Image (tube, helix red, strand yellow):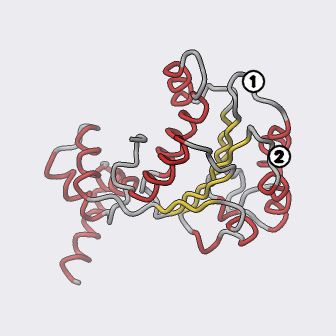
Amino acid sequence: MLAGTEDQPQARVILGTALSSNPSHAYLFHGPAGSGKRTVARAFAAELLAEGDADPDGVRRRVVAGTHPDLTWVRPTGAAQMRAADVEGPVVGAASRTPFESRRRVFVLERVDTMNDTVANRMLKTLEEPAHFVHLILLTDRLGLVMETVVSRCQPVRFDPLPPARVADALEAEGVESERALACARLSAGNAERARLLASDEGDGLRGDAEAMVVGA
């Protein structure tokens, strides 16, 4: 089973099938923040790049460390939107060049809902007619804001909110006391990132406000 898909049935089926056959050239991971999209994207990228390599475990370790030359990870540099420069060279230009080591090149783009018309248009040819070795994984917390020209060229993969027990286990593994971890997990509505914030010292006030809202509901 692909790491991170334990509580994501659609992702488990779609990506598991892809790894045993022919992966699509572009996927759109969508779902609430903190549902594990980045974790699964990295695990999926690791498997795509490890296939056929003489040292697949070494490939996976380098993907996790962010040091594999055939993995490009793009985050918007603009305060509220992705800029053309974020994709022009790192994705569009790089996608035309053959892999350094692996059989494939993988590009992960976060917050693709922040693409404007200019950025989306720069990406269209890469999304429509990528080289055979190119695979793109797009991530968004807000599917409704992703441009239709982008959505229509990707295979969608839905991510659901994580079960509170799973979030609590993750917090406990990070050293959060059991009762506090479970309370934060329940208040987070399946958002692991929010739960982590609530469990932190700076989240004490936020947790109190959230608990008051639940009691008053």
Please tell me whether residue 24 is drawn above or below residue 144 in the rendered image. Answer: above
- Residue 172 falls in image quadrant: top left
Q: Amino acid at mark 2?
A: Val
Query: Which structural element holds mark 2?
Result: helix
Extreme-bottom residue of the structure: 217
Query: In the drawing, what numbered circle is on residue 100?
Result: 1
Q: Secondary structure at mark 1?
A: loop
**Left or right: 177, with 209 as reference point:** left
Q: Quadrant of the C terminus?
A: bottom left
Residue at image coords 77%, 48%: 86
Q: Residues within 10 Å of mark 1 (few under 14, many from 20)?
A: few
Rendered location of residue 109, percent (x, y)? 66, 50
Q: Which residue is drawn at the image coordinates 27% and 51% (left, top)?
A: 166
Residue named by callout 2: 92
* Location of residue 43 in the rendering, given as x and y in whole percent from the top left corner: 49, 38
Q: Earlier in the sequence, mark 1 or mark 2?
A: 2
Q: Nearer the viewer, residue 158 or 19?
A: 19
Residue 141 horizontal side relative to residue 6, left or right: right
Q: Quadrant of residue 175?
A: top left
Q: Position of residue 79 (x, y in %)?
A: 68, 58
* Quarter of the N terminus within the rendering: top left
**Residue at the image point whose x is 59% and y is 56% from the top:** 139
- Single out the mark in the foreground, 1 or 2: 1
